[in-house]
Image (spheres, rainbow, N blue to C red):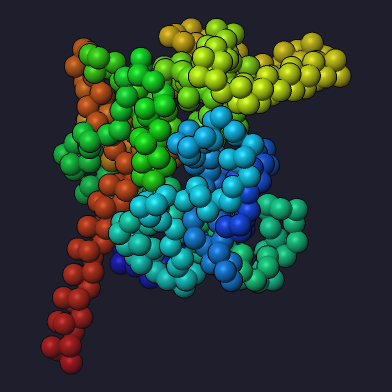
Amino acid sequence: MAVSLLANEVSDLCIGKPAVRSLPLSAAAGELAAALRRVARSGAAACVALTGPARAVVGRVGLADVLCFLCTEPGALARPAAALAKPVSALLPKDGAGEVRRVDPRSSILEALDAILSGAQVLAVPLRAGGRKKQLGGGGATAAGDFCWLTQEDLVRYFLNSIGLFYHVAARSVSSLGLVRTDFLSVRPGEAALSAVPLIRRAVATETAVAVVTEDGHLFGEISPALLAACDETAAAAIATLSAADLMAYVDYFGSPPEHILRAVKAGLKDKGLDAMLDLIEDETLSSFSSLSSASSSSDEETGRAQLRRPSSGSYGRRSAEEPVVCSPTSSLVAVMVQALAHRVSYVWVLDEGDDCRLAGIVTFADVLRVFREQLQAVERGCETAQRDVRKWL
């Protein structure tokens, strides 16, 4: 019965989760960027926790936060080395968006759900000392003060595993459930990517993305924090100089972007007098070329070619593997949940079913979780009624 879901604890969702890599607030932004590269190479979620006194968790940051900081901090693009030497506390949003909230492992799933729906972007759950092995940071027993993340995705997956208990809403369309939001974040393909930085920050806080939408309302692509996480801090140069459409191509092929895109970045930096950032791009280009040449010479020809990202047909060489995840207004709730979880995203774009397939809105995990919260409220009311009836007969 659905009532059994109310008895489970947060710790049930944390089994097998790795301890989060963390940095103190006094660490330099450049140290954070290096840590994010190491985390990304390990295959883990590319986010690092920021801790204050007594290792209290005060924030969660990713590469998108670093890029937004470099693009908005006065003088950062002109002097990137000086900007990256600043403490990571400067990266935290001033408005408190993207709140991290600590929850006890013995808290109920319902309490965790309420914390997410009341504004927490992610939950920090302490891990027991001396327990399982760390999966990040080189092994060893879990130390006191370690914790893991509990995300919207974890909760959606939890409810999907018990979707049969919610059969009366699982098969309903997302439009009939009122889940299609029309207030999504968007820019035009030809707009300067730099103008989208405030939207990228909001996308980080809301676990969504910025839609790149044509004048006639078609979804051209997206700029998402997850895709930006595949880059490094030099991608700030692309944001500062390219259009939204060209930034998509740059991010898709980071490490080996199309030559005309790379020329546009360098020309833009030169025009803006950002010589230090231009030198950083040049150094990174030479380093990437050297690494690629070394890989090609130490392996067979096919392995060497595999270091390059292969382009495909389509505008700006967009790769089909990274096309935005979409559904229709008539897609069922369970279908959208499966689709989003399969692609490891916390949102799905909704396209009209007409011949033009214009962008109609977005379905987010936060709104999906509100549906299940409403269902559990009904279960709670039923339990309270049953208890009152039992007491009457006793």
Q: Is residue 203 visible?
A: no
- State the residue in front, 242 or 211: 242
Q: Residue furthest bottom?
A: 394
- State the residue in front, 37 or 3: 37
Instruction: Work out whether 80 lies above or below 153.
Output: above
Residue at screen point 61% across, 64% down? 146
Screen quadrant of the C terminus: bottom left
In which quadrant of the rendered view does residue 24 lie?
bottom right
In which quadrant of the rendered view does residue 196 lie?
top left
Instruction: Work out whether 87 lies above or below 211.
Output: below
Percent across and percent down for residue 306 are: 70, 17
Residue at screen point 25% across, 51% down? 371
Percent across and percent down for residue 267 are: 55, 12
How many labels sit on residues?
0
Percent across and percent down for residue 298 are: 86, 19
Instruction: Work out whether 392 lies above or below 64.
Output: below
Residue at screen point 46% across, 66% down? 102
Instruction: Work out whether 1 lies above or below 90.
Output: below
- State the residue in front, 337 or 98: 98
Percent across and percent down for residue 152 are: 40, 50
